[in-house]
Amino acid sequence: MDVRLQRINKSFGAVPVLKDVDLVFPSRKFVTLLGPSGCGKTTLLRMIAGLEDISAGSIYFGDREVNRLAPRDRNIAMVFQSYALYPQMTVRKNLGYGLRVRKTPATEVDSAVERVARILEIDHLLDRKPGQLSGGQRQRVALGRAMVRKPDIFLMDEPLSNLDAKLRVTMRGELRRFHLDLNATTVYVTHDQLEAMTMSDLIAVMHKGVVQQFGTPEEVYSKPANLFVAGFIGSPPMNFLEGKIDSGRFRISEAALPLPPLTRGIAPGLDVVIGVRPQNLSFVTSAGPNALAGIVSLVELLGSEKLIEVQIADRKRISVQVRADSQIHLGQNVHVEFDTSSVHVFDKLTEQSVLEAMR
Amino acid sequence: MSRFSFLSSDRAVGLIFIAPFVVMALVFMVYPIAEAVRMAFFSYNPLRPDLITYVGLANFEFIFSDPLFWSSFTQGTIWTLLSILFQTVFGVGIALLLHRKLFGMAIFRGMLLFPYIVPTVVIALIWRWIFNPEIGVVNYGLLSIGLINEPIYWLSTPTMAMASTIMLNVWKYTPFVVICVLARLQAVPLELYDAAKVDGAGAFRRFIDVTLPQLREVLIVVIVFRTIWTFNKFEEIYLLTKGGPGTSTFNLAVYSFEQSMASLRLGVGAATGVVMMIMLMIGSIVYLRVAGFGTEEKST
Ligand SMILES: Nc1ncnc2c1ncn2[C@@H]1O[C@H](COP(=O)(O)OP(=O)(O)O)[C@@H](O)[C@H]1O
Ligand SMILES: [Mg+2]
């Protein structure tokens, strides 16, 4: 079932938390709400669940407006950040609770619980209580409780944030698999861009209650709509440099870097910020038109790569990602070359992408 | 390890912190209890301090064959059970109301502790006035709105006197239950209610499946303490009815007092106290076992 959010607004008292959120989540897609802490992700998710009033706007499931529908009548399921398992009930009781409340016959409840427990490999834990489980096991029970009712829409609020790093990576793949099995529209909330990139069909990047960009992981990564998205998506983060546009070139101190052909139409003299990812920078042996001179100020080994921080003119620093076996050392004089085609240009004033606006 | 490590160890600091309490407990709790237990085995008339004699179990034999002891026990038990029942039900109810952020609740919350703070002697005197059959405001009110046709003798028929002492106790100690329950309610994770809503539970199911289980431990503790305090309670009954009419509102505390002070049998009074202590100890242990105290799952 598809979910449509139409000009959703939300304020707590006089404080606006969500502003004109307009989104369509296509049926059976895995959609992620991504943004820093406090940007309104949980609030939006709770509104979809019916746990929070809508100040203005409408939510549709399919063709039905659900604004006034109670959570129980929405056929949704939700996994909470704290898991929110009922502490006095066994895992079996926790899993079956939603079905029992809905007066499902006991035999059906039992078989549904057993089925989900088998899928999640928690059948050996059914008679324990939540207090006797590890974090990862609790998380699976919380998932199971949501899966057992076969919901149309599956809501998850940072379900992996309480797990250790290794388990989190494993669970990313599993959640993705469960999504494919479940045939439900999944709305997933996270502040972790890597999680969003690896799991989602679509990502809505949010900041200060406003949707900054809504698109596939490739789109938000390679065509960021504004400075915020550009800085938030990707690791290590994108480099930003301020300067002016001058006849198809980007002027920063003495250097004038060539820009992609598309930027020829930009008004000369416009104050811009260009963004380029560390992966799209490289070292060259001699000064050239595309290169900036600088001194290596930090070398970080990331594993298979090295991140080199280079101090260029005006005490600016940029990061360059190179292979781990590159022989670059601290204090070395280097020239950094830009891959012109992968440079992003943003209007300094509006912070919007100039390139995307011209496409 | 250094020679001075004991003084700076956690253990030493802990001992220093609890030392004053241990001394106080020895002086003001252990000694009087020991003395009361000793007294239970002596014949002790305060007017004849020269005649204190060891009598073995005679004091216990006396009380166990005294019908007034047994009727005091029964009446005290009824008094305790009904007081606790109403306090718990009202306490939880009022706490749930206060927990919702309704208009005016802040004021009500402020007034809540009033009955608990006012000295019992003041309350009992006021209650004797307002329950006075001829000039009391309660009868006046009930008569004038037509609920009753003739005055109720609140404190001078056995049943009504018992009901009045229960009412006084409930009125005075319900706030204690409210405070304990309210504190616990504020610690219930809100996501549990959200999870139950999504699971489809209505308000009643949420109360049964989320709120009540969270209140279980605090209610067990509150009920144990309230039971002990109420079973031992003296002044509320004595000040309101003096145990009367007749002996119809005697409980064991009043019985013990009457034996000691009116009949000057301090040994019998002390023996009653020892019996009460043993009863409460056994009762509390059995109750905590049955109620399963300490087995609650802490985590969500
Ligand atoms: N019940 C509430 N009352 C007042 N403000 C709230 C409430 N819930 C959330 N907020 C505020 O709304 C903003 C968004 O919160 P939230 O949706 O929880 O953010 P996120 O999940 O993205 O971290 C935050 O500034 C938060 O302080
Ligand atoms: Mg959140």
Image (cartoon, coloured by chain):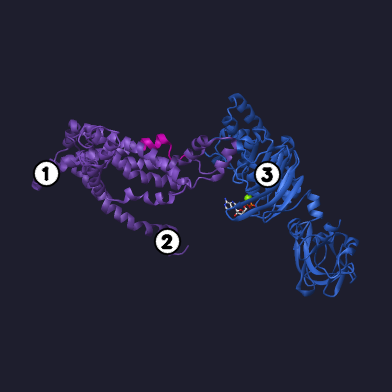
Chain colours: A blue, B purple
Cα gap from disc 1 to disc 3, whole angstroms: 85 Å
- The image position of residue A136, as x and y in percent, is 63, 43
In this view, the residue in front, A50 or A139, is A50
Disc 2 on helix, strand or loop?
helix
Give amino acid for label 3: Ser
- In percent of width and height, residue A177 lies at 73, 39
Q: Residues within 10 Å of mark 1 (few under 14, many from 20)?
A: some
Is residue B291 covered in magenta? yes
Residue A160 visible somewhere in the drawing: no
Q: Which of marks 1 and 3 is in front?
A: 3
Q: Residue A58 carries which label?
A: 3
Q: x, y percentage for residue A260?
A: 89, 62
User: Which quadrant: the C terminus of chain A?
Assistant: bottom right
Residue position for label 1: B45
Q: Main secondary structure of the magenta part?
A: helix
Task: Find the distance from the CA under tag 3 to the CA under tag 2.
Answer: 68 Å
Question: Any magenta on residue A233?
Answer: no
Closer to the N terminus: mark 2 or mark 1? 2
The local secondary structure at tag 1 comes to loop
Q: Do labels 3 and 2 share a chain?
A: no
Which chain letter goes with mark 2?
Answer: B
Residue A346 pos. (x, y %): 80, 62
